[in-house]
Image: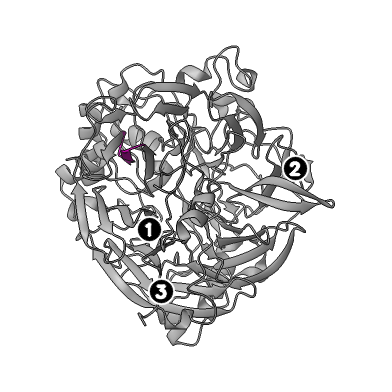
């Protein structure tokens, strides 16, 4: 991200990069957080040190801003020249005075956002200052002073991201910009969230001109004929396959003009017979020329993914000491709990990668890769295999239940393909390991800080009739069972149960959710009106209505649903820790410290503390020697740790769980720490949308 300050000399309409900008503005008593992740390097780091180890215990709330909405928040706001920009749970965009929390403006597009919104982007050239923000499938350009759409940008101030993807009938495609795009010079570069099942669009990485909204370049993550990687897919896959998309965010090396783009898995997530091959550039870290979109290098972490092992986090730039030399590197974390570290100029791994063969699939017609590779160092930050001695001992009945249930599972470790009619253990679970909140890196020490989930899940496949979905039940299995399960039981709260949904949700509400999506659920615009009505009837009455039109192709095997391994009382059926916070020295690959992160309040009251919990949202680290993180699902706390030792120095209770990454900034010589608190991930606990800022008491 580049930003203009009156005291900074600009050239070619561009200003210096944000890390330099922090130093420039500090003298004036202001230091911004102008980019998602803090700066183009995306290291979640700030040079601010007014709040430090010695005084953080005195931190108190400075202001709060209640959006007045429910639904939860995942947004990390940005702060530019004393103005904080954020997004509400329904994706209204607002600007606040960053020192007081007073609302300056709010923009309501008229579109009720139903997808996660993790942030925004800022661009300036001269007096032209713009906020670039995704609202469902649109990318808006707003005047940063007024919040009004800029009519000269694309089509009346917005780009319809369903277009330019090479698919017929763009209105039947689903894409949502859940993570903000990356600004480079006069370009905004975006990925997007896509469906987990077919049909769906490809995960093209696209660059649009910020002044006009015109498409500058596209990189095809599902290669077209003649492009590199085309031979790793079936010959016509580029016309029908979906996924291989960037939904987690990017990092930018401004000096080199290189964009680093992690991608997710190809659709469908767990059965890939229709996409035989390694499937470049799914599950990859791409280094692209930010000016042209040309590939410089790539690394594929999972070939022909059958486990939904996306790269879930934005990468971060760091300079490390390696073999006696300073190396400019790029770091990335994975759902499996691994840290990958590469020379950012050429993609050479700085720690060895070990490749070996893994079991082939037992599912007929499934294709599996010859080998898969994992880094030999650092050691994984999440447990890699589930054994009987890792089952819960929280209570004797819970342990006995877990032992009995565990005996029914297939448990073969990493890269064991799912099989039919038996649950396979996935550990770490489908939600990581690492997740979308990302990680922080201290550029002075090259220590990486990452929070991790450490809960087991299971999954399996079931044979279907294949061919076309002829009735509502077949349609449900092909489109809905991947999340809600073949039995409609789901895996709450991430994947709600649909059993008896008609008793508490109206047909109109169900139709709206299918049509527009909600939370983790994408929209299904490719379904016809008849198909939607048939699904509603099936969900509310069990009627397996026959379909007469708009048939949807089904796979020969389908995923039976995400099953979290929980004991009968709803706690993880594995032994703690269920969530951790880790500090890893990237120079050596060794751990500095590791601690549990989070608690269940009711268990803590019984003396079961330091269990750790599932957590979403990342850490932030500062020159004041502090690491700030919310993230924990159940205890609603924001915490500050000593970054060198992991010692807890301060904590406070938020109105809702802070499932977002905090930011820090300085206005009028006063440092603030802000986090979006919305909850929504703790079962039946209420959700909301409140931004809370903290500062030291005024002298």
Labels 1 and 3 touching (C-beta < 8 A): no
Q: Residue at x 38, y 23 (%)?
A: 468
Q: Is residue 200 visible?
A: no
Label annotation for residue 635: 3
User: Could you say where residue 393 lies in the image, as x and y percent from the top left?
Assistant: 58, 77
Q: Is residue 166 above or below residue 557?
A: above
Label 1 to label 3: alpha-carbon separation: 18 Å
Are there few (<14), some (14-19), or many (20+) residues within 10 Å of tag 2? some
Element at label 2: loop
Label 2 to label 3: alpha-carbon separation: 38 Å
Name the one closer to the observer, 120 or 138.
120
Please name which of the two marks, 1 or 3, marks the residue nearer to the observer: 3
Q: Is residue 672 visible?
A: yes
Q: Which residues are magenta?
A: 126-138
Q: How is the image coloured?
A: one colour
Which residue bears the numbered disc 1? 492
524 left or right of 600?
left
User: Could you say where residue 586 lies in the image, as x and y percent from the top left?
Assistant: 71, 56
Query: Which label's residue is closer to the chain start, 2 or 1?
Result: 2
Element at label 1: loop
Label annotation for residue 349: 2
466 left or right of 579?
left
Query: Which label's residue is closer to the chain start, 1 or 3?
Result: 1
Q: Residue at x 41, y 55 (%)?
A: 491
Q: Is residue 128 magenta?
A: yes
């Amino acid at each position: 991200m580049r930003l203009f300050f009156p005291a900074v000399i600009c050239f070619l309409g561009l200003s210096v990069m944000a890390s330099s900008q922090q130093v420039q503005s500090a003298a004036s008593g202001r230091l911004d957080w102008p980019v998602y992740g803090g700066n183009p390097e995306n290291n979640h780091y700030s040079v601010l040190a007014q709040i430090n180890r010695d005084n953080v215990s005195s931190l108190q709330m400075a202001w709060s801003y209640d959006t007045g909405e429910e639904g939860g928040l995942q947004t990390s706001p940005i702060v530019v020249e004393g103005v904080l920009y954020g997004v509400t749970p329904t994706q209204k965009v607002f600007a606040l005075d960053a020192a007081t929390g007073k609302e300056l403006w709010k923009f309501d597009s008229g579109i009720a956002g139903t997808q996660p919104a993790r942030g925004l982007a800022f661009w300036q050239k001269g007096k032209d200052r713009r906020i670039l923000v995704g609202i469902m499938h649109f990318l808006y350009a707003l005047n940063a002073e007024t919040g009004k759409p800029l009519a000269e940008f694309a089509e009346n101030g917005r780009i319809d991201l369903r277009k330019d993807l090479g698919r017929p009938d763009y209105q039947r495609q689903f894409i949502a910009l859940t993570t903000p795009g990356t600004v480079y010079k006069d370009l905004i570069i975006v990925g997007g969230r896509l469906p987990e099942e077919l049909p769906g669009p490809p995960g093209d990485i696209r660059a649009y001109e910020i002044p006009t909204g015109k498409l500058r370049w596209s990189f095809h993550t599902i290669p077209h004929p003649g492009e590199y990687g085309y031979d790793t897919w079936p010959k016509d896959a580029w016309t029908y396959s979906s996924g291989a998309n960037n939904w987690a965010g990017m990092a930018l090396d401004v000096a080199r003009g290189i964009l680093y783009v992690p991608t997710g898995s190809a659709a469908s997530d767990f059965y890939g017979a229709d996409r035989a091959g390694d499937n470049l550039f799914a599950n990859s870290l791409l280094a692209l020329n930010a000016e042209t979109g040309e590939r410089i290098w790539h690394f594929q972490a999972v070939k022909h993914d059958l486990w939904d092992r996306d790269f879930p986090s934005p990468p971060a730039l760091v300079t490390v000491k390696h073999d006696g030399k300073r190396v400019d590197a790029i770091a990335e974390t994975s759902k499996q709990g691994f840290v990958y570290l590469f020379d950012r100029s050429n993609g050479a791994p700085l720690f060895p990668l070990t490749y070996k063969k893994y079991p082939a699939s037992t599912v007929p017609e499934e294709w599996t890769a010859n080998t898969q590779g994992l880094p030999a160092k650092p050691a994984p930050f999440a447990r890699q295999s589930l054994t009987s001695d890792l089952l819960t001992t929280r209570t004797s009945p819970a342990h006995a239940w877990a032992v009995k249930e565990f005996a029914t599972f297939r448990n073969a470790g990493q890269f064991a393909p799912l099989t039919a009619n038996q649950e396979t253990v996935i550990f770490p679970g489908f939600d990581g390991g690492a997740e979308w909140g990302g990680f922080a890196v201290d550029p002075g020490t090259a220590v990486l800080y990452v929070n991790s989930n450490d809960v087991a899940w299971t999954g399996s496949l079931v044979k279907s009739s294949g061919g076309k979905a002829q009735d509502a039940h077949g349609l449900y299995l092909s489109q809905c069972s991947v999340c809600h399960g073949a039995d409609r039981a789901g895996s709450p709260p991430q994947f709600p149960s649909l059993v008896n949904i008609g008793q508490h949700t109206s047909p109109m509400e169900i139709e709206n959710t299918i049509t527009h999506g909600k939370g983790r659920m994408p929209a299904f615009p490719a379904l016809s009106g008849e198909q939607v009505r048939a699904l509603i009837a099936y969900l509310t009455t069990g009627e397996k209505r026959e379909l007469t039109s708009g048939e949807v192709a089904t796979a020969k095997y389908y995923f039976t649903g995400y099953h979290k391994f929980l004991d009968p009382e709803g706690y993880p059926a594995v032994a703690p820790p269920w969530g951790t916070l880790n500090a890893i020295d990237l120079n050596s690959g060794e751990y500095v410290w590791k601690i549990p992160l989070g608690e269940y309040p009711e268990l803590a009251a019984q003396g079961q503390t330091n269990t750790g919990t599932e957590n979403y949202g990342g850490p932030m680290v500062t020159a004041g020697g502090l690491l700030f993180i919310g993230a924990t699902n159940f205890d609603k706390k924001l915490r500050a740790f000593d970054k060198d030792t992991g010692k807890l120095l301060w904590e406070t209770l938020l109105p809702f769980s802070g499932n977002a990454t905090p930011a820090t900034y300085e206005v009028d010589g006063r440092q603030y720490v802000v986090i979006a608190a919305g909850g929504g991930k703790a079962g039946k606990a209420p959700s909301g949308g409140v931004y809370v800022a903290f500062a030291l008491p005024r002298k």
